Image (cartoon, rainbow, N blue to C red):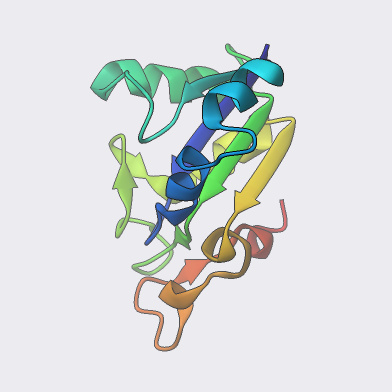
Amino acid sequence: MTNVLWLQGGACSGNTMSFLNADEPNVVDLIVDFGLDIIWHPSLGMELGENAQKIFRDCADGTRDLDIFVFEGTVIEGPNGTGRYNLFAERPMKDWVNELAAAASIVVAIGDCACWRGIPAAEPNPTSSTGLQFHKR
């Protein structure tokens, strides 16, 4: 099985909706046919709180293999580079992104926001939103 962890950053869940509404193949066929184990997804993950955080920590530190890390939305770096405008699982999302991307075999930036910053990064960009390519990792 290929382990997949999917997180959502700033201003996005549209790609999740497209994924869940897919027809050819549908989500179930895609997961089964390609041998994917969606170990966590914001709309599909059953784990909450400490149980979800354990999955993230185990993937980040290599205790659990992370084959594919999918990120949807922007990486919010504000205010002043802290990332505290977007806290997730008791930490800035940007910290999770950096650690999980480093641990993953493949990183997928899905959608305009994750790829190119999208509308959230339009001037004056009060959240300091970026896309994954701006991290160069």
The image quadrant of residue 28 is top right
Residue sitting at x 56%, y 39%: 23
Residue 96 visible? The answer is no
- On-image quarter of the N terminus: top right
The image quadrant of residue 55 is top left
Residue sitting at x 43%, y 55%: 14
Give percent across and percent down for residue 133: 68, 61
Residue sitting at x 57%, y 34%: 100
Task: Choose between 83 and 15: the one closer to the eye.
Answer: 15
| Vertical placement of residue 16 versus 33, above or below | below
**33 displayed left or right of 113:** right
Task: Choose between 109 and 91: the one closer to the eye.
Answer: 109
Q: Say how many tags the image has.
A: 0
Residue sitting at x 63%, y 39%: 101
| Vertical placement of residue 121 versus 4, above or below | below
- Residue at the farthest left position: 49
